Amino acid sequence: MKELIKNIRAKLKMNQTEFAEMLNVTFATVNRWENGRVVPNKLAQAKLYELCKERDISVYDMVIEKIHAASRNIHLDRGKVLLYHGSKSGIKGDIEPKSRRQCDFGAGFYMGTEPGQALTLICDYEKSRFYIVSMDISNLEVLDIPADLEWAMTVAYHRGRMEKIKDTPFYNKYRDMPKGKDLIIGSIADDRMFYVIDNFFIGNITDAALINSLSALELGKQYVAVTNKGCDAVKIECEVELSYLERLSLKEVAEFNRAKGISLANKICKDYRREGMFFDEMLDEALKEVSL
């Protein structure tokens, strides 16, 4: 927190006295904040947040730089990848594949290549924790799902959207894809992609619109350890503390990105509204194949 306050003051080009006057606190208070002897309370942090908004200072960029700085200090052996994980209540005990089953790729331990995705996922939760982790993938069985219809159908299966065609070859294909795998890699479905894929499932857009949205949004990858062997390959490198001020900034960025992503997705969906197939049509085709 103290480095964040110093950075904000530096961007404002103010000394501690000027900064204190702007926030209606004493010089001694600012000095204690920057020395780390006292952490600003929520009211003071909210004031800092509003000040940053007024002066167009991006606290979000500072958070990302803090994470990148911490990441640069981590040495990775061959076969390891650096990833990010957000937890709503913190990791307690061993890492296990125990997320709820109706996540994108089923129950697992979810990590991402982009810190922003994990940060915005947990910003609403006061007890949440952000982790930089490494994963040794050299001895794991890996399923790497391309950013196309295979990804969408894998997500559809795990979210329970294929139950009407249960036990058909089409259904069984996606049920069986993860068998024998320790790690699944595929595109992240953040708030922007949730909007698009839900519209695909309810029949508002076609698979062509979905796939083009997936490509255009450039969401990054998620790595999901789906077995205990996969989870054992994950190592927590460090935890990055998030202040109330930083969480406020993350909420703002999450809302902005979601609105921006939805606007982009709506344009793509409009452009491709006459191309491809709808989700229900695909399921109906799968049922027809069984009846023939």
Image (tube, rainbow, N blue to C red):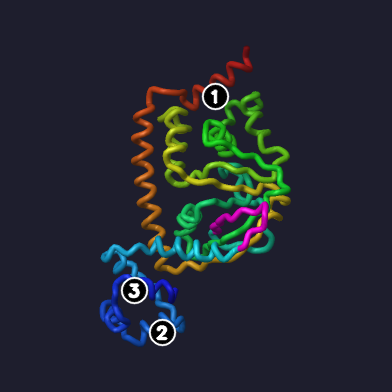
Task: Please name the amino acid that badge 2 sits on.
Answer: Arg
Dot placed on the residue nearer the N-terminal end, 1 or 3: 3
Disc 3 crowd, CA 10 A, few/some/many (<14, 14-19, 20+): few
Mark 1–mark 3 contact, CB under 8 Å? no
**Is-magenta flag for residue 86?**
yes
The Cα–Cα distance between marks 2 and 1, rounded to whole angstroms, is 63 Å
Tell which of 94 and 144 is nearer to you. 144
**260 to the left or right of 133:** left
Provide the major secondary structure of the magenta segment. Answer: strand
From the top left corner, tell me how far across and down residue 267 is, in percent: 34, 35
Mark 3–mark 2 contact, CB under 8 Å? no
Residue 131 vertical position relative to residue 29 in the rendered view, above or below: above
Q: Which residue is mark 3?
A: 10
Looking at the image, which residue is at 54% across and 57% down?
Answer: 86
Disc 1 crowd, CA 10 A, few/some/many (<14, 14-19, 20+): some
| Residue 241's disc number | none
Mark 2–mark 1 contact, CB under 8 Å? no
Looking at the image, which residue is at 43% across and 74% down?
Answer: 3
Q: Which residue is mark 1?
A: 283
Secondary structure under badge 2? helix
Q: Which residue is mark 2?
A: 32
Quarter in which the N terminus is drawn? bottom left
From the top left corner, tell me how far across and down residue 16 is, in percent: 32, 82
**263 to the left or right of 82:** left
Say if residue 180 shows up in the picture.
yes
Dot placed on the residue nearer the N-terminal end, 2 or 1: 2
Dot placed on the residue nearer the N-terminal end, 3 or 2: 3
Residue 33 vertical position relative to residue 86 in the rendered view, above or below: below
- Mark 1 or 3: in front is 3
Task: Please name the amino acid that badge 3 sits on.
Answer: Ala
Tell which of 239 and 247 is nearer to you. 239
Q: What segment carries the magenta color?
A: 75-87
